[in-house]
Image (cartoon, helix red, strand yellow):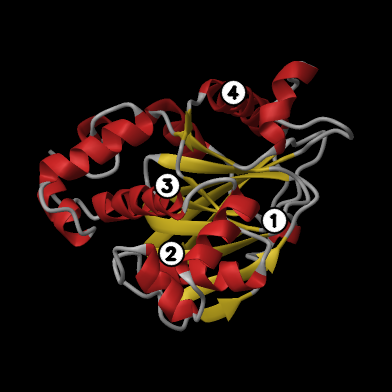
């Protein structure tokens, strides 16, 4: 469905939760409604965004990512990002101090830092979820933590960073092009992925020929329109599953003739059945 017009708001008070070498992990939580979108902004530190309830979509210059309750998005320092709320959400955020020249959760070897220099969707373990909920979420300027509280925070942080390092990445990112014409078309597909089933329909909306659009997809994103739209449908399926929709309903809403056809697409794309790929998101997925 189209996202419609949203109320645009600024960054959610990041200046009150600045991570430092002394307090390298800071936590906060905000309630956001579906009629709200957070304008593009960036931080000097890394960020991990969790949708503990509801679903958000975070967009960066070259991609967009769906974040349902069972997942989190890693955003490296200085990466501009915007937030679109797809379903009312309690969004929890961790801000992570990053020493100069380093990237990742904690002191990673250089070889392991490469993967953390890009945005990535991560699985969220029950332990990581519990740790985040136990963290101090008061902003700067409130009562200072005493020695015992700081020691407890350090222990929680160390375990949370270890869980982040262990978290498995999930293929839920959708690449976006730099070409303005193609980006408008891609945004239309993201907003309403089932409006057209073929490239010809989308190309007609954009006032271009299917051949031109196909060529732009290859040049800009290194993939076909069909493969790219498949990633969009996977992301949409995750969003629907977060609302505890049965797989048969998800398949029908995404334009598949049967649940088995949808299941085959998921298996081809991610190498696992929908019950595994979507099961942690919505308990009714079968």
User: Residue 142, labelled with which disc?
Assistant: 1
**Which badge, 4 or 2, comes first in the chain's sequence?**
4
Residue depicted at x 32% and y 48%:
238
**Which badge, 1 or 2, comes first in the chain's sequence?**
1
In which quadrant of the rendered view does residue 11 lie?
Answer: bottom right
In the picture, which quadrant includes the C terminus? top left
Front-most of residues 134 and 80: 80
**Which badge, 4 or 1, comes first in the chain's sequence?**
1
Residue depicted at x 35% and y 47%:
234
Query: Are the residues at dot 3 and dot 1 in contact (C-beta closer than 8 Å)?
Result: no
Q: Secondary structure at mark 4?
A: helix
In the image, taking residue 256 as reference, residue 198 lies left or right, namely right
Circle 2 residue? 190
Mark 4 vs mark 2: in front: 2
Q: Residue furthest right?
A: 100
Circle 3 residue? 227
In the picture, which quadrant includes the N terminus? bottom left
Q: Is residue 274 depicted above or below 159 in this figure?
A: below
Q: Is residue 279 depicted above or below 252 in this figure?
A: above
Q: Secondary structure at mark 1?
A: loop
Mark 1 burial class by Cα count in 10 Å: few <14, some 14-19, many 20+:
few
């Amino acid at each position: 469905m189209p996202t419609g017009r949203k109320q645009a708001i600024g960054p959610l008070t990041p200046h009150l939760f600045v991570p430092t070498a002394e307090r390298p992990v800071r936590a906060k939580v905000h309630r956001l409604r579906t009629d709200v979108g957070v304008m593009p902004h960036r931080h000097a530190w890394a960020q991990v965004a969790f949708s503990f309830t509801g679903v958000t979509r975070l967009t960066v210059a070259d991609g967009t990512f769906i974040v349902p309750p069972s997942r989190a998005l890693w955003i490296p320092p200085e990466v501009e990002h915007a937030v679109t709320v797809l379903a009312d959400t309690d969004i929890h955020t961790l801000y992570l101090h990053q020493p100069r020249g380093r990237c990742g959760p904690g002191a990673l070897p250089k070889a392991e830092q490469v993967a953390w220099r890009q945005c990535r969707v991560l699985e969220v373990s029950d332990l990581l979820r519990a740790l985040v909920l136990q963290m101090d979420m008061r902003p700067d300027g409130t009562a200072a933590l005493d020695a015992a509280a700081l020691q407890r925070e350090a222990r929680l942080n160390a375990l949370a960073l270890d869980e982040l390092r262990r978290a498995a990445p999930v293929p839920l990112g959708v690449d976006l092009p730099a070409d303005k014409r193609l980006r408008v078309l891609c945004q239309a597909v993201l907003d309403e992925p089932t409006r057209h089933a073929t490239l010809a329909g989308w190309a007609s909306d954009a006032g271009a020929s299917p051949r031109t659009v196909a060529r732009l997809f290859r040049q800009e994103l290194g993939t076909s329109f069909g493969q790219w739209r498949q990633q969009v449908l996977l992301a949409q399926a995750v969003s629907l599953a977060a609302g505890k929709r049965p797989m048969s309903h998800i398949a029908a809403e995404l334009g598949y003739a049967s649940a088995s056809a949808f299941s085959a697409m998921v298996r081809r794309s991610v190498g696992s059945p929908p019950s595994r790929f979507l099961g942690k998101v919505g308990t009714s997925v079968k």
